[in-house]
Amino acid sequence: MAVQFSILMPVYNIQKYLRQTVDSLLSQDFRDFEVVIVDDGSTDATPQILESYGAQIRFCRQANTGAEFARNKAASLAQGEYLVMMDHDDVLLPCALSTYDRIIRAFGSPALIIGAMAYFQDGQTVPPGAPSPGPVKVLKYENFLAKDVEVGITNSRIVIRKSVFDAIGGYGNGGEPAFPSDDFNLIFKAGADGPCIVVQEPTTVVRRMHETNFVRDVGAVIGGIFGLIRFDRQGRYPAGSSQRLGRYAIIGGFSAVWALNYCWRKKHRWQAIRMLLGTAPMVAVAVWRRFLRTLRTPTQPIFLQDEPQQTKSVPMASVSGAKKRLAEESASEYDVEGGTWQHSSEKHG
């Protein structure tokens, strides 16, 4: 049966965080959704944890081929009009789907929605999120590459209409091995589709920062960025000078911030220099576009009016049980006195 949203999540050896993440998916205020999870060959207790959810989720297993292929597999099983991407260690706040639904109705089924993300260190308490319904503040652009604000790119922020996802070939990268920057790759492939709505308020997803985050793998990050440049030169992304400059600005902005704020500070000096040299034209475009923004009137935010909450069918026992477990986990294992919350940008563009 068709649903409004399919939440898609690949998982791999993530037993430490998995139950909290899945509970957050099942704790949504909006009910018309499904959860599709693909286990990418886990060797820990991940499959057993997923099995404990029974009919609340749909999941299957595959040999370990990489998150990109697992996401495509999940998408092939999805029945939703919109695909909500999710990483296996993040937390989706209860207001997320109701916020996305209001945006879809207000803007006539946009091609792409970018959720609002907060970041927290592993060990801190997950924030409760905004009440739903509540005020929604967004920016509207012709497409993602036309944006005039910095937006961190990560899979858990991406909500894409399934028809658009299918038309661009999903996460496909031309039959090559799993690609580490699959979030950038998907956004660049959908770069010409619009409109794109960027959520500023409320926060819809929370990213957990820990020692095994992708951005801490220096070799993988450099390989992913250089792979994007190679794909661009091979003509795999939408043509046009404005599209290319938009991609260059995103690559250059992320490369500069990551090389200087992470690599250099962590004493990975050679890798920082390698990244900056390899992306020098893109860094120049990013700096130039940032300067131009200071000369232009920024896009004005749009505020959606409060409205009665939309309630659709999912067993309330499932939702209340997931919310209870999520609250218990947040209040015990993940609670740290004095923890602070802030918006940040892990990948800049």
Image: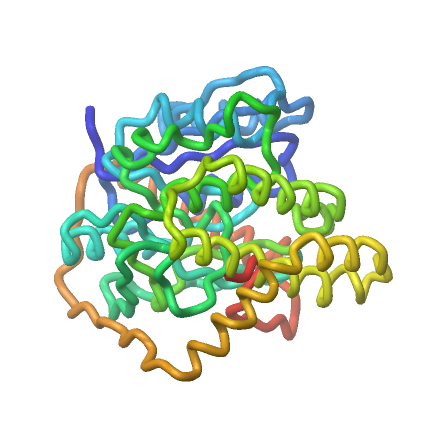
The image quadrant of residue 270 is: bottom right
- Given residues 225 and 95, the one toward you in this image is 225
The image quadrant of residue 137 is: bottom left
Report if residue 25 is visible in the image: yes
- Residue that appears at 22% across and 38% down: 4
Query: What colouring method underlies this structural image?
Result: rainbow
Above or below, 103 against 237 in this view is: below
Q: Is residue 259 left or right of residue 225?
A: right
Above or below, 121 against 302 in this view is: above
Q: Is residue 138 left or right of residue 273?
A: left
Residue 138, horizontal then vertical, whole percent: 29, 66
- Residue that appears at 37% across and 37% down: 7
Residue 325, horizontal then vertical, whole percent: 48, 46
- Given residues 83 and 270, the one toward you in this image is 270
Q: Is residue 15 left or right of residue 31?
A: right
Q: How many marks?
A: 0
Residue 296, horizontal then vertical, whole percent: 35, 81
- Residue that appears at 53% across and 31% down: 68
- Residue that appears at 46% across and 42% down: 86
Above or below, 258 against 183 in this view is: below
Report if residue 27 is visible in the image: no
- Given residues 207 and 161, the one toward you in this image is 161
Name the image quarter holding the N terminus: top left
Residue 76, horizontal then vertical, whole percent: 36, 22
